[in-house]
Amino acid sequence: MEEESSQVADHAKTIHDMEEAAEEDRDPESKPLNQPLLKRSRTLSSNPLAMVGAKVSYIESLDYEINENDLFKHDWRSRSKVQVLQYIFLKWTLAFLVGLLTGLIATLINLAIENIAGYKLLAVIHLIQKKRYLTGFIFFTAANFLLALFAAVLCVCFAPTAAGPGIPEIKAYLNGVDTPNMFGAATLIVKIFGSIGAVAAGLDLGKEGPLVHIGACIASLLGQGGPSNYRLKWRWLRYFNNDRDRRDLITCGASSGVCAAFRAPVGGVLFSLEEVATWWRSALLWRTFFSTAVVAVVLRAFIQICSSGECGLFGTGGLIMFDVSNVTITYCVMDIIPVVVIGIIGGVLGSLYNYLLHKVLRLYSFINQKGRLHKLLLSVTVAVFTSACQYGLPFLAKCQPCGSSLSETECPTNGSSGNFKQFNCPAGYYNDLATLLLATNDDAVRHIFSTNTPTEYQIPSLLIFFALYCILGLFTFGIAVPSGLFLPIILMGSGYGRLLGIAMGSYTNIDQGLFAVLGAASLMAGSMRMTVSLCVIFLELTNNLLLLPITMIVLLIAKTVGDSFNPSIYEIILHLKGLPFLDANPEPFMRNLTVGELADVKPQVVTLCGVEKVARIVDVLKNTTHNGFPIVDGGVVAQVGVGNGATELHGIILRAHLLQVLKKKWFLSEKRRTEEWEVREKFTSIELAEREGKFEEVAVAREEMEMYVDLHPLTNTTPFTVMESMSVAKAMVLFRQMGLRHLLIVPKFAGGGVPPVVGILTRQDLRPYNILTAFPHLARPKEGEKEN
């Protein structure tokens, strides 16, 4: 923890120095990713800029807190048993639809990728058989160039938020960060077709991350009734017009995406629980499991249909499956030594991969900031380089003779799949490197995971394979196409895992294919820092519980080693994008600071009266960007022991609700409290759930400025509050666990002349480097300890 705090302190100092040298009028789009996008000063900043996908956007926090105003209370009390049953039924129906649609789209993506990539490889192999090597190279490179260009054009021109895996943004959304346009219809369409183009182009990326994003997009669109411009106004959908229920649906979508990628329903649920979800409860666990079960049934049905050859080249492929249920797995106590070694190697290599990828992403940010053309050129350059390596490197491998136990139909093979590809070899020989490189990524995983093949792959070929995918894994992620990190890391890990299996030789009873599986698991744990979900995913992939003990050991060791060097890859990406993600564990220096001290370095809190003038509301909305305003009533009857002039904190009102008041012109000619029926005639709880609206769209006449508005019925009367003496660490834990947007700070002492609210905390105020910028002395003790 002390090292982490020192790193945060050093990082804050570096940021401060860079900002002093930066130009004041710099375009936000040109800011590189190594600089946090928030403009800071010696006071706490709240300027919400971040990278969403590949575009700088203004972001806000989500309202996961229940807004308990008078309208909400009346709506809740008036709900009948039928309406409650409708709400429950609709939640399960939407969970079913999320699983069904995610399974169908995942199947279509797999069908498209396997057929496009399969027929492309068949054409290349046909040209190689005719010794037309140059023509084969030109065709292979041109096909991959066009497919990658197609995916990049979609992302760059139509939906920049579809680039990348989307998992960091989903993780931020479930943490309470509203990432605009991240789950729209355009993003969904581009993600689907972009994934097909990018993966079919042979790029070193997977469809697993995009499938998680696709599932989340489907869930979000279903919950809000479709795209923003064409939303269904179905009466039942009003129940889901809030951030809390949409959060649950997106969690179901993320779980369904993982299940669709690996055919691992339990692993999908645990992935959401361990990696992306900040807030969890048992009812959500049931619904996510139901969604993933639907996905598994859909995938199983299509695999059964396609096994008869009715899906082109798809067959039983397209889904990573490594069935070792028929393989006898034996290991003894001494086999724990190579298992520990592979776990340590996975942790070291995983943290090294995170470090190098961080540098590459910073480099790519400088290239991408130059404009769309440079993004396209970067994507197609990586595609051409990948194609040249995949086609040219197999010529370096020596041809291996087919074993006597193999029939002529098994070795060599000239189809799009098969463990013994002939490539440029004579009859009766095969090229082991071509088997791994001239195949789809899923087939490459199946080949290198294959068991009972101790002599199939030679050490030089595996070294080339491992080195190539280490390079491609670094330089492919970050280009403007939908991309996932799961498969590149699996390919890298399986390469060194199989190499270690060959090195161990007769010293272990573990098969080389199982070493490849353990290598992939160790590198994923070393990079992504997941344990439980990865363990279950690999068990569902391998279909054998005998692997459980050694898989657990590998994952735990790899994660422990990786954590001692740097954060997980998703945390690094979150930081680079500037998304205000709140970690579960506060920094140690936060315990040395109170929320009252934070309030002192912020601008004075803007409050409104319970019955406020229209002119005052217009002025506040025009001159501030705050999204919440405390409602304070003066002249209340003082309690015993409290002096005259006491004030009361009635609650907090949202900016969106103030805009609704001005739009509907709910004005009073005299200063008075309204009756409950007056409010219900003008507003509904459905209208107050809407987040859209800008101040520029509101028109208020001059004579209306002197009128009044009763804000009491629209005020959340039960906001979360903390004493000004509470530590920032404790306040941050409360803020994160409750999914808050605003946290009011109240004084420790009450009395006449003492304001009922000292300040208001938002997500930006609780970010560590924002705090260190305003309080640099908090980092000095740690820096001194580091120097000593």
Image (spheres, helix red, strand yellow):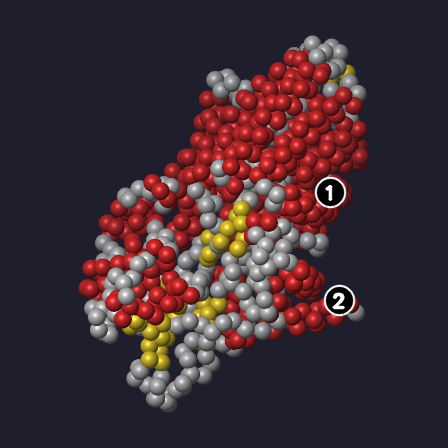
Q: Nearer the viewer, residue 423 or 536?
A: 423
Q: Nearer the observer, disc 1 or disc 2?
A: 2
Q: Is residue 706 visible?
A: yes
Which residue has dot 2 on it?
786
Q: Residues within 10 Å of mark 2 (few under 14, many from 20)?
A: few
Q: Earlier in the sequence, mark 1 or mark 2?
A: 1
Rendered residue at 69%/20% (across/down): 137
216 is higher (above) or lower (below) than 64: above
In-image side of 692 versus 594 (left or right): left
Q: Where the N terminus falls, by quadrant?
A: bottom right
Residue 534 is situated, as x and y percent measured from the top left of the image, at 59, 43
Q: Which mark is residue 342?
A: 1
Q: Is residue 487 visible?
A: no
Residue 504 is situated, as x and y percent measured from the top left of the image, at 79, 36
In-image side of 559 versus 598 (left or right): right
Q: Nearer the viewer, residue 15 or 290?
A: 15
